[in-house]
Amino acid sequence: MSVARKPVAFGDQRGWIDALREAGELREIGAEVDWNCELGTIVRLAQGPGDGPAMLFNNIKDYNGPESRCGQLFANGLGSYSRLAMMLGMPRETSARELVRVARTIMQERIKPVTVATGPVKDVILKGDDIDLFDFPSPHWNRVDGGRYIITYAGCVTRHPVTGVMNVGIYRGMLASRTEIPMLIWRAQHIGNHFTAYEQAGLKEMPIAFVMGWEPAMGFCAGQPVPPGVCEYDVMGGIRGEPVELVKCETVDLEVPASAEIVIEGVISTDPKDFVMEGPFAEFTGYVAGDRSPKPTCRVTCITHRNKPVMSGAIEGSLPGSYSENAVCSSIMRAGTAWNVLDNAGVPGVTDVFCPPVQVGINLLVSIKQTYRNQAKQVANAIWGSSAAHVRYKHITVVDDDIDIHDYAAVDWAIAYRVNAGEDDVIIMPSTFGAGLDPSTRRRDRNAALFGTGKWNRVLIDATINLDYDPDPDLGGARFPPTVWPSEEDEAKARARWEELGLAAAKRG
């Protein structure tokens, strides 16, 4: 049965924090924590496999004095399915399967933003010599990082110089000086498309604004594959059921949420001589990625913020036992996006799609009801031919609809007994575009500056029953033997005696 969604507008990050506090989803940390590696380590350990709390750090070393401009940091707000459901206006106990179904249409629910004269984000306006990025408690998240990363979960706002459409994405940005933030930009991403458009138009600088701390819909939308030409502010409005209130920036032609905590405005030069060293960084793969090299760099022109702002940030990298916010959101949204791609391509019989969060959507699981042979290959071709596959869906496993793709033991069983590599059940699609941060790719092929993206050799594992096999008359015309699971009648009789047999604590299925 479908779960009803009731859109929720939290107002700002503080409203979201209040909602999490009331729901028992927030842990406030009052003990002093060092921004230098300790804070990141705590977040890494506490977030767990999608079951850790949201965290509000209230006592950060070097930023806990009475004159500190900013002394708090909020993390892991969307690090669980229960909080993702809250953000979407659904019961906290909503299953991942149901969240994926909502994800299929959530990006189509759009309400255009409105522009207002001013808002709390204009409480303090800093320009010129007053700008100092070190006033904010940017963590050195991981000891292996190339520096402190101020931009990890901020909405990075740019505008296409021809269409005028704004984009809000999530990208990484390192703290290089009081006024400089070098960034990793891939040409195949939306920000890379904008950057290339500025170059081709002969424009020397691309305006940018970083929004730190607003409603969870911003981080959620900014990290997902919203179609090109669609502004994420429209989608955020659809998710929250109300238009996003925007204010104009002070020094660049961009607009940002009026109730954001912190906004950093600036320009990125298109001239490589203005690039600044950036990287490496502990990336979404769970490995260190992105070599230290000169990268496009934001020169900050203005900072606006609320009184006593609450900074936001996220630790990247999903590992067994520790899933990032990106991993939890991607497992739902990348699955919903893939399902829509399959529908739009006319692939029939899709019954379920999922991306387990531990690998952030790199692997895709698809369940289908087969009606003709090689249907699984059609699934892979449709996915890999879409723009959504740029940094996701490297490996696709397709199973029959009797396999629960949310149960990895079931998927593993299907791979063990329904895959025959000699019957073309394992297909390699060589040399496609892919994630340049994947450590399984040769270092040369991960050079985003040289190639604009990475290179993947993709794999399809067809774990469906092979309809190329001849029907077996000894099996009543079936192509595969029956499983050894009891008949429904025998199972019902046995379960009726479960308590009598003293097996009530050993229920199965």
Image: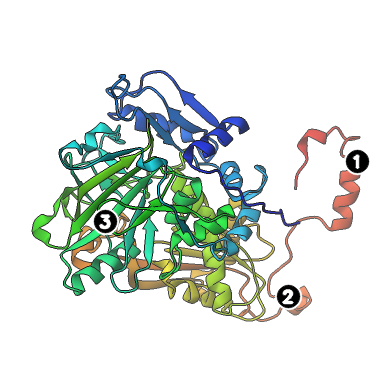
Earlier sequence position, callout 2 versus callout 1:
2
Residue 358 appearing in the image: no
The answer to whether 54 is drawn above or below residue 171 in the figure is above
Identify residue for label 3.
252
Determine contact: label 2, label 3, CB under 8 Å. no
Q: Quadrant of residue 344?
A: bottom right
The answer to whether 312 is drawn above or below residue 110 in the figure is above
Who's the residue at 44% across and 48% down the image? 326
- Of residues 399 and 424, the one nearer the viewer is 399
Which amino acid lies under the numbered mark 3 shown in the image of this protein?
Answer: Val
Which amino acid lies under the numbered mark 1 shown in the image of this protein?
Answer: Arg
- Of residues 448 and 23, the one nearer the viewer is 23
Q: Nearer the viewer, mark 2 or mark 1?
A: 1
In the image, is 386 to the left or to the right of 64? Answer: right
Q: Position of residue 498 (x, y in %)?
A: 87, 39
Who's the residue at 22% across and 39% down the image? 147
Dot 2 surroundings within 10 Å: few (below 14), some, or many (20 or more)? some
Identify the coloring.
rainbow
Q: Nearer the viewer, mark 2 or mark 3?
A: 3
In the image, is 56 to the left or to the right of 271? Answer: right
Mark 1 falls on what kind of element? loop
Identify residue for label 1.
497
Mark 2 falls on what kind of element? loop
Mark carried by residue 478 = 2
